[in-house]
Image (cartoon, grey):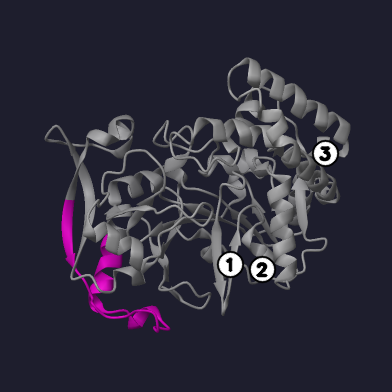
């Protein structure tokens, strides 16, 4: 019963969608364990580009069952829009998507609450935080509740009244939300046939020794417990989120892949030690097309941060790394890597000692010569230029984890196996 998990090792946007897609051949089930419509997984197949937000990337492979787990907060409107878009592109989703009974639901009031904050820490304003907050306060509604639309309508009105009383939204919000609420109720009715006992489905697949692939959203440095709080997401993108979000015991995961870019990016606010707020950062952004798949926001760009990467590897126990966007560095004469930090002139012992004061650290850099040639047409890892091989080897040494996949372009076929 092989179980493979794919987890983002940085601040999200590492290219997990492409890596999951490349692993889907031979998979029977692909399951997502946390997050919601704040995720954006981009997969390019020939001339078609698919941007997936809630549906696992396995949907692009015929016959694969896709599971939206109990650790997610699901937006019915966005989910049905996504399914409709897939169908229009010729992807048959019939009978292939299962939504956990106990996944929580993002409603129009959650979105309104999120918009009212103005995204002060750089959230996507998709209602994710308020939905998870209601879940923790035991006020939330779950997917199974969508069977009773009267109950759902009452919840929205009652929740809105509380939000007005608490000053979370303006009293005029109800009138503004009427069209959204109507769309929500229509979508909710369409979502009901997707409801299933996903824990039973996964356990059945494991017992039958089927191949299961687990897909995470965001990245480990955005974990609400282990990330750069408060500039984090509202769930657990780390390996720990898999057991609670899907009901799969962690000891059954025999392949744990951390996905890292060959440099680093971050969207939204929060400390980013290797950020390049200059022409080099802009060059990385433009060359790498670093704009959010969900919001279109420009991503902050910087050099690879090995101190943060080591931390991500340690707390997740990655068995291997998939390195993406190596081709973005093709034309750089010199490439820098942060091997560690200084804090007030003292060398830092580990990332976890400064995670709460990360804005105060100074990166310790080493420089590597670039390869200054195009990687996009290579068909095997052995064809990589010598300096590219040395760069990969050094990242392996710094993280302590073997790099077994290297992505050299957006296409499905542009992945080299080492």
Q: Which residues are magenta?
A: 365-394
Mark 1 to mark 3 CA distance (whole Å): 31 Å
Q: Nearer the viewer, residue 153 or 246?
A: 153
Report if the CB atoms under discs 2 and 1 are less than 8 Å apart.
yes
Circle 2 residues within 10 Å: few <14, some 14–19, many ≥20: some
Q: Is residue 117 above or below residue 243?
A: above
| Residue 330 x/y as whole percent | 29, 74
Would residue 405 appear left or right of 353 to someone viewing this image?
A: right
Please tell me which of labels 2 and 1 falls first in the chain: 1
Q: Quadrant of the C terminus?
A: bottom left
Q: Is residue 262 above or below residue 61?
A: above
| Residue 320 x/y as whole percent | 44, 59
Please tell me the numbered disc located at residue 146: 3
The quadrant where residue 153 appears = top right
Please tell me which of labels 2 and 3 falls first in the chain: 2
| Furthest-left residue in this view | 345
Please tell me which of labels 1 and 3 falls first in the chain: 1
Q: Nearer the viewer, residue 400 or 104?
A: 104
Would residue 190 appear left or right of 112 to someone viewing this image?
A: right
Q: Residue at x 34, y 65 (%)?
A: 286
Would residue 186 appear left or right of 395 to someone viewing this image?
A: right
Mark 2 to mark 1 CA distance (whole Å): 8 Å
Q: Quadrant of the N terminus?
A: bottom right
Circle 3 residues within 10 Å: few <14, some 14–19, many ≥20: many
Name the residue tied to disc 1. Answer: 21
Name the residue tied to disc 2. Answer: 60
Secondary structure category for the residue under label 3: helix
| Furthest-top residue in this view | 165
Report if the CB atoms under discs 1 and 3 are less than 8 Å apart.
no
The quadrant where residue 104 appears = top right
Query: Does the magenta segment cover residue 281?
Result: no
Mark 2 to mark 3 CA distance (whole Å): 27 Å
């Amino acid at each position: 019963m092989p179980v493979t998990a794919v987890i983002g090792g940085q601040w999200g946007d590492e290219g997990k969608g492409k890596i999951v897609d490349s692993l889907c051949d031979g998979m029977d089930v692909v399951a997502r364990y946390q997050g919601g419509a704040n995720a954006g997984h981009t997969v390019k197949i020939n001339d078609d580009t698919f941007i997936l937000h809630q549906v696992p990337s396995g949907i692009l492979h015929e016959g694969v069952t896709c599971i939206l787990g109990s650790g997610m907060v699901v937006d019915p409107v966005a989910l049905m829009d996504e399914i409709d878009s897939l169908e229009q592109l010729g992807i048959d989703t019939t009978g292939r998507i299962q939504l956990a009974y106990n996944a929580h639901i993002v409603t129009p009031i959650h979105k309104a609450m999120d918009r009212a904050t103005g995204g002060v820490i750089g959230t996507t304003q998709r209602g994710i935080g308020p939905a998870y907050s209601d879940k923790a306060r035991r006020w939330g509604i779950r997917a199974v509740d969508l069977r009773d639309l009267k109950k759902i309508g009452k919840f929205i009105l009652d929740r809105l009244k509380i939000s007005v009383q608490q000053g979370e939204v303006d009293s005029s919000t109800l009138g503004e939300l009427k069209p959204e609420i109507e769309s929500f109720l229509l979508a909710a009715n369409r979502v009901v046939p997707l409801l299933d006992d996903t824990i039973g489905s996964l356990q059945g697949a494991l017992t039958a020794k089927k191949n299961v692939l687990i897909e995470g959203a965001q990245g480990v440095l955005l974990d609400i417990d282990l990330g750069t709080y408060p500039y984090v997401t509202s769930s657990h993108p780390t390996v720990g989120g898999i057991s609670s979000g899907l009901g799969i015991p962690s000891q059954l995961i025999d392949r744990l892949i951390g996905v890292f870019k060959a440099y680093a990016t971050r969207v939204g606010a929060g400390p980013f030690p290797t950020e390049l707020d200059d022409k080099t950062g802009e060059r990385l952004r433009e060359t790498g097309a670093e704009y959010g798949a969900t919001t279109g926001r420009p991503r902050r760009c910087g050099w690879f941060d090995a101190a943060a990467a080591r931390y991500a590897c340690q707390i997740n126990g990655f068995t291997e790394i998939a390195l993406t966007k190596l081709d973005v560095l093709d034309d750089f004469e010199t490439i820098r890597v942060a091997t560690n930090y200084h804090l007030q002139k003292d060398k830092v012992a580990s990332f976890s000692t400064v995670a709460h004061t990360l804005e105060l650290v100074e990166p310790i850099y080493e420089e590597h010569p670039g390869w200054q040639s195009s990687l996009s047409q290579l068909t095997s890892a052995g064809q990589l230029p010598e300096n590219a091989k040395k760069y990969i080897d050094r990242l392996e040494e710094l993280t302590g984890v073997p790099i077994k996949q290297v992505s050299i372009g957006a296409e499905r076929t542009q992945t080299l196996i080492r």
